[in-house]
Image (cartoon, grey):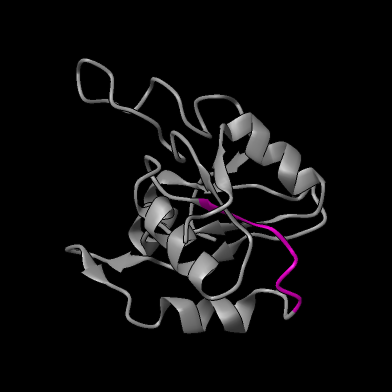
Amino acid sequence: MSYAGDLTPQEAWTKLEQGAILVDVRTEGEWAHIGIPDTKATENDPLFIPWTFPGGIPNPDFVDQLKQQAPEDTSTELVFLCRSGQRSIAAALAATQAGFTSYNVLEGFEGEPDRYGGRTVNGWKNRGLPTNLGSK
């Protein structure tokens, strides 16, 4: 079973404006040091559930934490976001298997690295979508 699809950051924002919930699956360190999406202009606050812990250790409780935090009505669409759009694919697949309608945000929060290794090319924050610096 696959997830519902991939969205550009702009398409993800439109989904959020239509009532979907953003699920940021990055680590606490990423939230604190790189920033978080600001969804105040939508009707739902984002959920912050790490897919992995520092060192790439998988979060064995991810699906249980998602079920605790997401609406009980699994018809609410979930939009998954990570740094570059890779961990969020795995999270969207796991959420789909748990019964949620799940999308992945292409490019992630920070996007692809430029030729110098800086993440300045694309992604949620580089496309000018609302962002807060600091932790959640």
Magenta part of the protein: which range? 73-80
Does 49 appear above or below 22? below
Q: Quick check: 2 left or right of 131?
A: left
Query: In the figure, residue 56 lies in which quadrant?
Result: bottom left
Residue 78 located within the stretch drawn in magenta: yes
Q: Residue furthest top?
A: 115
Does 114 appear above or below 16? above
- Residue at 82% from the left image edge and 47% from the top image edge: 18
Between 134 and 124, the one nearer to me in the picture: 124
Residue 2: give x, y in percent of width and height. Answer: 48, 55
Residue 42 located within the stretch drawn in magenta: no
Query: In the figure, residue 74 lies in which quadrant?
Result: bottom right
Query: In the figure, residue 127 lies in which quadrant?
Result: top right
Does 33 appear above or below 10? below
Does 133 appear above or below 60? above
Q: Quick check: 36 left or right of 60?
A: right
| Quarter of the rendering occupied by the C terminus | bottom right
Residue 35: give x, y in percent of width and height. Answer: 48, 47
- Residue at 60% from the left image edge and 84% from the top image edge: 68
Residue 46: give x, y in percent of width and height. Answer: 63, 59
Task: Tell how many labels.
Answer: 0
Between 3 and 112, the one nearer to me in the picture: 3
- Residue at 69% from the left image edge and 39% from the top image edge: 13
Classified by dominant secondary structure, the portion drawn in magenta counts as loop
- Residue at 28% from the left image edge and 19% from the top image edge: 114
